[in-house]
Image: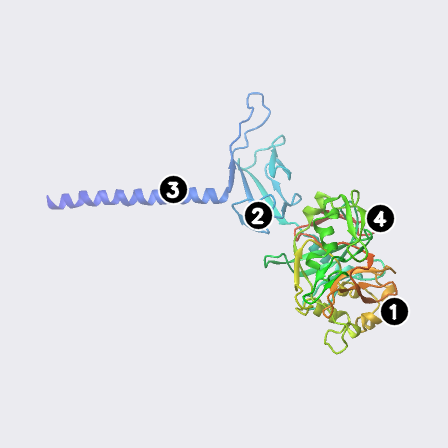
Amino acid sequence: MKLERFKEKDNKRKLIIIFTVCSVLLLAGVFLYTSYAIFTEEKEFNVINGQYQDPGDLYFTVYIDGKITNTIPAKDSGYTLDTEKSSCTNGTTMTWDNSTWSASINLTNYQAGNMSRTKCTMYFIKDPTAADFIKDLVETSEELVYDETSDNNLRYIGADPNNYVLFNDELWRIIGVMNNIDDGTGTKETRLKIIRDESIGWYSWDNKASDTGSSTSIFGSNDWSDSALQIVLNSGAYWNRTSGACPYDSNGATITCDFSNNGLTDVAKSMMDDAVWNLGGLSSNSNDLNYYGTAITSTYYIFERSTIVFEGRPTTWTGKIGLMYPSDYGYATSGGSVCLSYSLSKWNDYSTCYMNNWLYTDSYQWILTPHSSSSSDVFRLSSNIFVADNHVYYASNVSPTTYLKSSIKIIGGTGSSSDPFELSL
């Protein structure tokens, strides 16, 4: 009798084990099925009218950068569907709509195969950014050269390289692919730096009264963070695409400026982002290490990014529209190593340096870099070829310069003036 009770318990134990094993196998089957069919979709078919055969279970398998995943990348993540590689089985076809970020399946030519399940495989790849696009041109272009600075920026060089880009409904030009650009939050990115192909007019860098601590100057200040020109470009008439008063000559004098046709558009603004602009300066004192009279291009690059400034001046400014640096001008030449090893202030001795430089305009043009030994002097590109120091209230050409967002893409064009690169967010 005791033995029979023992056997009865043993049978119950076997049933429990068998049930447990079956449950595990069932769950494993469900898991494998759902892993194989990442996305499934139920559909209704017009079977009565005979328009479609029932394709059975339709499922999607998604790859991002070659790796299988169970999520589709977000719409604005910088990915796009590789339509040539993506496909469906059993005669069905897939159409992708970027605007709605969804796929449509055409079952017209559906044919049942050995398996009734219809599989659609989707391959998402990262869209190359504008910076990536330009970098890919290096191997086939003599117009692109790395500047060998600590940031290893890629720059366009030569008398007239194919660096034209359609921006703000007008021609701008790409200075280069600039690395380690801080957006003001500490995040550093690789971004395109572009400059307007033509000047927006002749204006003063600044001309308001400035208290230097010991006296008040009526000739303006070389503090870019609150200069009259900076305000016009970043919050004034140019930024707002309106007309207004722009700085011109000393004593706070102004001239009417009308940017209602060539100021920034909303689309152009959406393509820019804040950047930290370095305001380190050079000195007119020949005894200083940062003396501009002997500075070569690489020296300018270093001191532009230094903390050597006139007393009380900021070392950086965060904003969207600035001006080119002296080093931007120097690194744009294709005149050879002699140009990069010779003082920028003496380039007028070597026509090969400036005649093979697309940033040369044979006219006065403002530059961002201030003097470190003066409260009211900055550098500008002089009409007699070299970079020179001048008072901020003088009038010179203004060519707005900006850093595009790192996500900007090039979607067309060859970069020539007649077929400029086309940009897209």
Q: Nearer the viewer, residue 410 or 376?
A: 376
Q: In the shown orientation, is residue 47 left or right of residue 397?
A: left
- Give residue 387's quadrant in the image: bottom right
Q: Which residue is mark 1?
A: 348
Residue 63 circle label: 2
> What is the three-letter code of the residue carrying label 3?
Leu
Q: Position of residue 105 (x, y in %)?
A: 60, 34
Q: Residue at x 66, y 49 (%)?
A: 127
**Count of numbered tags:** 4
Q: Which residue is mark 4?
A: 418
Nearest to N terminus: mark 1 or mark 2:
2
Mark 4 Cα shell of 10 Å, populated few (<14), some (14-19), many (≥20): few
Nearest to N terminus: mark 2 or mark 4:
2
Relative to 295, residue 85 above or below: above
> What is the three-letter code of the residue carrying label 2?
Tyr
> What is the three-letter code of the residue carrying label 4?
Ser
> What is the three-letter code of the residue carrying label 1?
Asn
Q: CA distance from mark 3 to mark 2?
A: 27 Å
Nearest to N terminus: mark 4 or mark 3:
3
Q: Nearer the viewer, mark 1 or mark 2?
A: 1
Q: Position of residue 319 (x, y in %)?
A: 67, 54
